[in-house]
Amino acid sequence: MKKLEYSIIYGVIRPEISERLSVGLVIVNGDKVKVRYSRKKLEAFKLLLSSAEYEFMSKVLHSLSQNGRITSENINYLSRYSNNLIALSPLQVIDLEPSASNEEWLYRQYVSVSSKTQA
């Protein structure tokens, strides 16, 4: 059975204290890599970063999601050597079959902004 591999994309708010917010997810399924990010969370960075930093972050996320050439090796490299605005977690393996529903579950768990409030 194939296992689902993923990396969480973080927007770094204050690198000196490792304050960050999950903004996207990279899903690896064999040779196929899918990048998905939250536009709502990206919009929140407009309030937290300078205009130039926000534009850079936005362009990087858009580029990652449009670039079909990202590989597992790229993800592992970026998780070790990222810049101060975008960080990736090391590639993780979860004991789930790669499927659209499992990818959606991961996205909801790590990235999605829920409209429900919790007590």
Image (cartoon, helix red, strand yellow):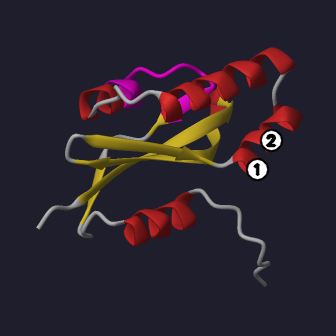
Residue at 45% across / 27% down in the picture? Answer: 67
Q: Residue furthest left?
A: 1
Residue at 30% across / 51% down in the picture? Answer: 92
Q: Position of residue 113 (x, y in %)?
A: 70, 62
Q: Position of residue 71 (x, y in %)?
A: 29, 31
What range of the chain is rendered magenta?
Answer: 77-87
- Crowd band around label 1 with a 10 angstrom C-alpha radius: few (<14), some (14–19), many (20+): few
Q: Quadrant of residue 56?
A: top right
Q: Is residue 41 left or right of residue 110?
A: right
The stretch drawn in magenta includes residue 73 = no
Q: Residue furthest right?
A: 47
Q: Position of residue 88 (x, y in %)?
A: 46, 36
Alpha-carbon span between mark 1 and mark 2: 5 Å
Relative to 85, residue 8 above or below = below
Q: Which residue is mark 1?
A: 40
Q: Is residue 50 left or right of residue 53?
A: right
Q: Tell me the element at label 2.
A: helix
C-beta proximity under 8 Å, tags 1 and 2: yes
Q: Quadrant of residue 117?
A: bottom right
Mark 2: which amino acid?
Glu
Q: Which residue is mark 2?
A: 43
